[in-house]
Image (tube, rainbow, N blue to C red):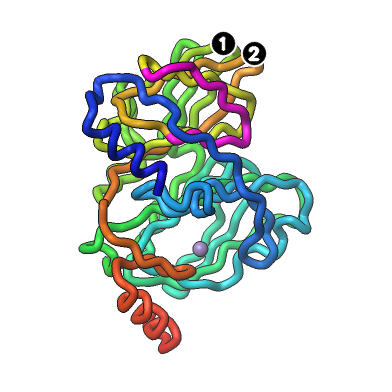
Amino acid sequence: MAVEKVLKTQKSADTNCIRPVVLSVEGLRTSDGDGVKLRRFIGSSTLPKLDPFLLLDAFSSDEPRDYLGGFPEHPHRGFETVTYVLAGRVRHQDNKGNNGVIEAGGVQWMTAGRGIVHSEMPEQQDGLLSAFQLWVNLPAAQKMTQPQYQEFSAAEIPIEHGHSSEVRVIAGETSAGTVGPVKNVFTEPIYFDVTVRPQGFFMEKIPPTHNSFIIVYEGSIVLSSGSFGEDKVVEAGTLAVLGAGNRVNVTGKDAGAKFLLIAGKPLNEPIAHSGPFVMNTRAEVMQAFQDFWAGRF
Ligand code: MN
């Protein structure tokens, strides 16, 4: 895959530099679940994956028919799903007896592991629903681990105040030492929700081992590309895949901006993916279907 080749080539280079933008992705308009309209940024032909990330969907609509169908009961095995709600409320319920509502500003980091069957439904009849769902792959040795949840409300997510930026630290640690509540040893993820004021500046370290991207959801930013060439403007509704390096430099445009900065350690393992199951081999995917049909989840 083109983008991963670019990233691999770059990794042999010096990583003491600003990460340049290597690909800009506009979300593909599609629908999933029971007719939920969304934009898919990772998991489409433009960007099939960005190891360890398998999928990124963005939902944002104040039109109830775009989201009311929700995601009725469905299984997952072999990876993690991360739901981050910006506006509105999402109810989840699973076959292990867990049930709860993710409210605006809250996150649910679900390790599906060996398997769960759950539903994700809007807990509202109208109004704005805005959320992201990210799928993070699990290493082969952990694909059959016990399912588990990490769920945090807006109040439980620390906010780091910079000179002209604000960072909600969901996972990972900032260079100033703010640590997100989500603990994850599998891919050591960074998941920051950043607000940068008009002409404001945001700089952060990203471990050189990690793949990383920024998705802008409000306003627009300028991403410095360091010695790799021109700076890039990234508008709301665009995902920028970042190349090799150890930091990112962002400047807010005139209206300021809001964006997610996400990074994770690539697994570099074979992927066999069919629908809600992501394993390493085709035989393991077939086994997942058999286990699900036999009620062994
Ligand atoms: Mn799901």
Work out whether residue 247 or residue 174 is closer to the camera in this orientation and state it.
Answer: 247
Instruction: Return the residue at label 1.
Output: 199
User: Where does the image place residue 243, in percent across and percent down from the top left?
Assistant: 37, 31
Q: Which type of secondary structure does the marked residue at label 1 adopt?
A: loop
Instruction: Return the residue at label 2.
Output: 254
> Magenta part of the protein: which range?
228-241
Q: Are marks 1 and 2 in contact (CB under 8 Å)?
A: yes
Q: Residues within 10 Å of mark 2 (few under 14, many from 20)?
A: few
Q: Amino acid at mark 1?
A: Gln
Q: Amino acid at mark 2?
A: Asp
User: Where does the image place residue 134, in percent across and percent down from the top left?
Assistant: 47, 50
Residue at point 45%, 86% (across, down): 293
Q: Is residue 270 left or right of residue 238?
A: left
Check mark 1 vs ligand 1: CB closer than 8 Å? yes or no. Answer: no
Q: Is residue 257 left or right of residue 55?
A: right
Residue at point 54%, 46% (across, down): 41
**In magenta segment, residue 239:** yes
User: Where does the image place residue 186, in percent across and percent down from the top left?
Assistant: 26, 51
**In magenta segment, residue 246:** no
**Vertical comparison of 117 with 124: above or below:** below
User: Where does the image place residue 123, in percent across and percent down from the top left?
Assistant: 66, 57
Residue at point 24%, 63% (across, down): 140
| Farthest bottom residue in view | 294
The tag earlier along the polypeptide, 1 or 2, is 1
Give the quadrant of residue 245.
Answer: top left
Q: Which type of secondary structure does the marked residue at label 2 adopt?
A: strand
